[in-house]
Image (cartoon, rainbow, N blue to C red):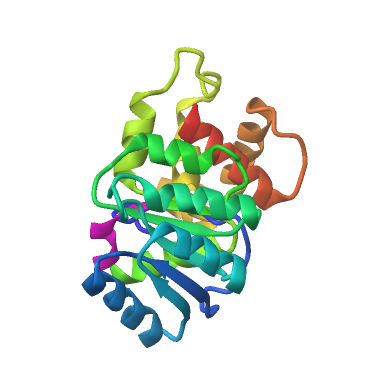
Amino acid sequence: MARSGAAALSGGAGPAEALLRVVIAEDAVLLREGLVRLLAENGHQVLAAVGDGPSLVDAIVAHRPDVSIVDVRMPPSHTDEGLRAAVRARERVPGAPVLVLSQYVEVSYADDLLADRTGAVGYLLKDRVAQIADFLDALRLVASGGTVLDPDVVAQLLVRRRREDPLRNLTPREREVLTLMAEGRSNTAIARALQVTEGAVEKHVTSIFAKLDLPPDEEQHRRVMAVLTFLRG
């Protein structure tokens, strides 16, 4: 995804054009209907479009969608009912992919979504929906098990980095590589951005895994864990 879009990584290898089965939870009728139309026009299937938290949980349990789009603030108090419902739904359907939309940056919401460290979650500002291609890419990444965070959320998470930084042993170049990994870029794309060879990038990635104490495992899983360490460090 481009730098102007969400910070993201692909936690799965689903095809870019995979069609998705989606549940939408948004109490604002115009936005809800706009999302339904946007998804339908791009070939995706909307299984349910609801306006409150309990209905979201019921829809996810009943339909087991590929991904759900959830507004943070929904009735009755319009605080964080949507987020809480998404967390409850993931307890009922472990690993259910959820992309949360918010009007404002609330870093604590991202913390809640990342708490179980299983991926398949996203947190974007509603303004990002207007960037249709990036928004649909983010939806696919979350559906495939990836993690997608709004750049403004990433910036605030980095400000809150603790003194005991797990990234302290990384070289400046390795931090650059990890930052680009967090934006969802492949090794080939990272090499192009840094104007180095793909082999050099692979060596940096291997070194990053070693320094973050991520033992050999499925490649995508280690990328997810490395980026989550970067975001939560």
Direction front: furthest residue: 76
Residue 230 percent coordinates (x, y): 50, 33
| Residue drawn where x is 46% and y is 76% of the image | 48
Front residue of 115 and 56: 56
Dominant SS of magenta comes to helix
Judged from this view, the residue extending furthest toward the right is 216
- Vertical position of residue 108 compared to residue 166: above or below: below
**Residue 145's spot in the image, x, y percent?**
59, 57
Q: Nearer the viewer, residue 116 or 188?
A: 116
Residue 203 is at least partly visible in this image? yes
Residue extent of the magenta highlight:
124-130
Q: Is residue 156 left or right of residue 173?
A: left
Any part of residue 195 in sight = no
The image position of residue 7, as x and y in percent, is: 40, 49
Q: Is residue 224 magenta?
A: no
Decide: is 21 above or below 228. below
Q: Give the farthest residue toward the top.
A: 163
Instruction: Find residue 157 and report its horizontal and vertical position in percent.
Output: 38, 32
Please report the residue visible at 32 percent of the width from the left and 35 percent of the height from the top: 155
Q: Which of 49 and 95 lies nearest the eye of the viewer?
A: 49
Quadrant assignment for the N terminus: bottom left
162 to the left or right of 131: right
- Relative to 22, does residue 74 appear above or below in the rendering? above
Q: Which residue is painted at 46% across and 36% down in the image?
A: 111
**Residue at horizontal 52 percent and vertical 69 percent from the top:** 59
State which quadrant residue 26 falls in.
Answer: bottom left
